[in-house]
Amino acid sequence: MTLTRILFLPVHIVLLAAGLIAGSKTPPRFQIAYPLLHTASFFAFWYFIPPSDAPSDFFFVCAGVEAILRSFSLHLIASPWKTFYRLNQPSFDQLSLYGKINWAVNISFSTRGIGWSWQLPNLSPALPYKTRISYTFYAVRRLLFAFLLADLARSYQALYIPWIATTGSSGIRIGDLPFLQKAMTFSTCSMNGIASQLMPYEWICLVFMLCGADLESFNRPILGEWREAYTIRRFWGRFWHQNLRWIRQTQARYLAYNILGARKGSHLSNYTQVFYAFFWTGVSHWAGLYMIDPTRTWARTFWFFPLQGLGIVSEDLVIAGAKRLGVGLRKGKDGKDVATGWAQLLGRVWTLTWFFVTAWGFLEDAIRFGLSNETGSFTVVRGLLGKGWWV
């Protein structure tokens, strides 16, 4: 088997876990050594290990950037040895050596803190499946759904959108297509994006569960409920995956409170967190493209993310005006103001329109880069249409 970078992804987990164990005995002024070591290791693997295919190398870079940022958060801001513990279990200092290793590995794997003291708010409700058999059937159904969703989307693109089928080498650019074709392309790209989140997550959860992991660790869906996504803020904060949220939030709050002197709940604090999060998400995606193909700037990939912050500011101004006028609001069961049905419908139209207008540069970069390449993939849709069962 050829040695490629993607095979070294588990090294990030090992470095994070080892850093947490060693960091528990390290004075605060020396904690910086662990994220710096992680950074050096990432570049060493990048330099000495040969590349593989573009999608795998892209994922390696993005995961590496996020692991480095996570290491900075853990060692310089969070003090996890004092604040991170599994609910209803002892703190770090009271654990045995095996318990401490297990604690460190779990934190290194966990991105949303499910079942921990640092669990993210507003996650989807826990799944009702309490046994391994019932969860296995659920995961298999989700995997089949994700496969068919992606297969349907990619089959349409391969048959009817030449620019995607040829990785941007021929045909009309998707951003220049007629409206109806553009709408179909946007829909299929969205389907691909959803499937790309569901498939790996369900596979990882299924494998870990079959290996004996606690169901509580991953009993929340990776994506939220679509009914929550009636603003851009709620799309990113409640519907889309929250795997990067703790890293961004920890660093952005430190920047807002400790450096900028913002008060909790203030506009300065709010928008510092919004733009900081989207800035680093843009950097992560841009780095994945640029480090593999530095002949292009890939600027549209980066700017897609800070642009989401501008969309959130715009809708916040409209929502603030509506609240002043008492328009589009009703009292919820808890007595708080919630959007009425027609306001939510209008919000969904706004959110979809926003992405339809802003996403094309990001999508075209991804396609030109080869992230839509499906060589060697099995297809049901094209097989049934007589186009072959394998791509």
Image: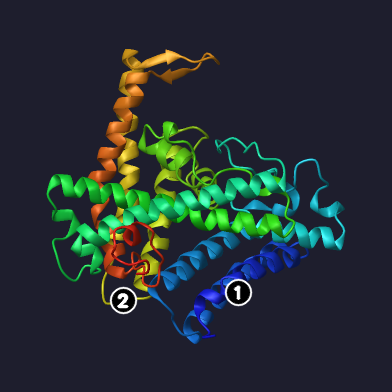
User: Is tag 2's residue or tag 1's residue first in the polypeptide sequence?
Assistant: 1
Taking 387 as reference, is 172 left or right?
A: left
Q: Quadrant location of the C terminus?
A: bottom left
Query: To which quarter of the image does residue 101 belong?
Result: bottom right
Instruction: State whether residue 140 is above or below residue 10.
Output: above
Q: How is the image coloured?
A: rainbow
Q: Quadrant location of the N terminus?
A: bottom right
Spatial CA distance of label 2 from label 1 is 25 Å
Please tell me which residue lies in front, 137 or 305. Answer: 137
Q: Is residue 114 visible?
A: no
For mark 2, what is the residue? 294
Taking 200 as reference, is 385 left or right?
A: left
Please tell me which residue lies in front, 160 or 354. Answer: 160
Label 1 residue SS: helix
For mark 1, what is the residue? 37
Point 77% across, 59% down: residue: 102
Taking 77 as reference, is 296 left or right?
A: left
Point 53% across, 61% down: residue: 69
Going by the numbered disc 1, the residue's amino acid type is Leu
Label 2 residue SS: loop
